[in-house]
């Protein structure tokens, strides 16, 4: 953590802890508790403190290399390595909340290379982190670009109003269990569910129920109202609604217009938010002629493709870092 590039919360002097040690460059802080064993013991290394009065907060363990065995910037990666994390998970205790204490660290060991080797490892991983941060900035800029363009181009009061039921046929998926997915022999057709991560893919089946261009939306749960454009052969679970847009309109364009308005039609007064087929059928959107739809769709599709490409690059960078953290410190 480069402290000159981030802001930290402040406390009043009278509210400060009675016993504390100010952090120095190269110090580390471990999370001593978490609801997940993957997060307990997570570490940050402090860099560029520049004589600021920084203390570790509650539920952290402050660490310092008193024997000068490591260089600044190395420990954060070493303590994020697979070999270290495995030992932390093994020693963490609890049921709903997992925790570690400073005493646990006497039972943990990792290999420490020469300082020259530490410098090379830390530099490689730092450059990879910087590249990933740049990549995430590109992705955020693309997201904002598409949002701005969509709001400018897709909200035209002069376009003709249509109800969804007048421009497409609505349907729904079927119940697909994880047991069914696991029993497949040669699964290659995606199963779309109510989730929004991983493009909504829950798994794959040997067969498919839908083919062509469709819109799907999440009917139930926290993501109710989320709209996707689908193309190809696929399946849907029972918490996915489907729309087969007629030939007079561009399905991708309709999906972009629809996802701007669906959230306000979600029933949130229920324990489980819903956007059912009857409500979706009555939603009104404005659409231009098909030629204009296709022109705007080409522009937005290019942004989507670029967005997907940049996300794939981030995933690859993260995979490379995971591999390095698993092997450089073994």
Image (tube, helix red, strand yellow):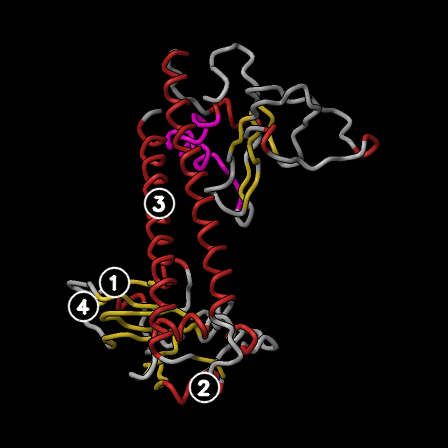
The stretch in magenta equals: 76-94
The image quadrant that residue 99 belongs to is top right
Which label lies toward us, 2 or 3? 2
Task: Name which of mark 4 and mark 1 comes first in the sequence.
Answer: 1
Q: Which residue is mark 3?
A: 315
Task: Give the side of residue 273 with respect to residue 83, left or right.
Answer: right
Q: Residue at x 73, y 35 (%)?
A: 10
Q: Earlier in the sequence, mark 4 or mark 3?
A: 4
Q: Is 263 inside the magenta-drawn segment?
A: no
Left or right: 33 with respect to 150?
Answer: right
C-alpha span from label 2 to label 3? 39 Å
Q: Are marks 4 and 1 in contact (CB under 8 Å)?
A: no
Question: Which residue is nearer to you in this view: 171 or 14?
Answer: 171
Sequence-earlier tag: 2 or 4? 2
Name the N-terminal-most of marks 2 and 1. Answer: 2
Which residue is labeled 4 in the image?
A: 206
Query: What residue would you read off at disc 2?
Result: 162
Distance Cα–Cα, label 1 vs label 3: 25 Å
- Residue found 66% across the figure and 34% down from its top: 57
Residue situated in front as seen by the camera: 182 or 90 = 182
| Residue behind mark 1 | 182
Ranked by sequence position, the earlier of labels 1 and 3 is 1
Q: Earlier in the sequence, mark 2 or mark 3?
A: 2
């Amino acid at each position: 953590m480069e402290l000159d590039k981030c802001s930290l919360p402040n406390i009043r002097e009278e509210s400060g802890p009675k016993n504390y040690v100010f952090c120095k460059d190269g110090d580390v802080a471990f999370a001593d508790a978490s609801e997940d064993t993957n997060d307990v013991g997570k570490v940050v290394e402090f860099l560029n403190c520049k004589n600021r009065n920084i203390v570790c907060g509650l539920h952290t363990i402050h660490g310092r290399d008193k024997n000068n065995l490591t260089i600044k910037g190395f420990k954060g990666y070493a303590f994020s390595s697979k070999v270290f994390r495995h030992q932390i998970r093994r020693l963490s205790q609890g049921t709903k909340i997992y925790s570690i204490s400073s005493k646990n660290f006497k039972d943990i060991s990792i290999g420490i290379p020469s300082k020259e080797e530490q410098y090379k490892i830390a530099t490689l991983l730092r450059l990879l982190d910087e590249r990933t941060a740049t990549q995430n900035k590109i992705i955020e800029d693309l997201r904002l670009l598409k949002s701005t363009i969509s709001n400018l181009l897709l909200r035209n009061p002069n376009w003709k109003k249509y109800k969804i039921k007048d421009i497409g046929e609505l349907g729904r998926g079927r119940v697909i269990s994880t047991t069914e997915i696991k029993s497949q022999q040669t699964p290659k057709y995606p199963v779309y569910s109510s989730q929004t991560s991983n493009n909504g893919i829950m798994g794959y089946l040997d067969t498919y129920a839908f083919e062509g261009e469709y819109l799907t939306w999440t009917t139930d749960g926290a993501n109710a109202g989320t709209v996707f454009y689908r193309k190809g052969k696929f399946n849907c679970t029972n918490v996915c609604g489907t729309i087969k847009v007629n030939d007079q309109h561009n399905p991708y364009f309709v999906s972009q217009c629809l996802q701007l308005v669906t959230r306000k039609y979600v029933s949130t007064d229920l324990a489980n938010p819903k956007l059912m087929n009857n409500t979706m059928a009555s939603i009104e959107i404005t659409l231009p002629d098909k030629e204009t739809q296709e022109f705007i769709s080409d522009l937005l599709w290019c942004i989507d493709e670029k967005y997907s490409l940049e996300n794939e690059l981030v995933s690859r960078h993260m995979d490379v870092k995971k591999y390095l953290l698993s092997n450089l410190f073994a």
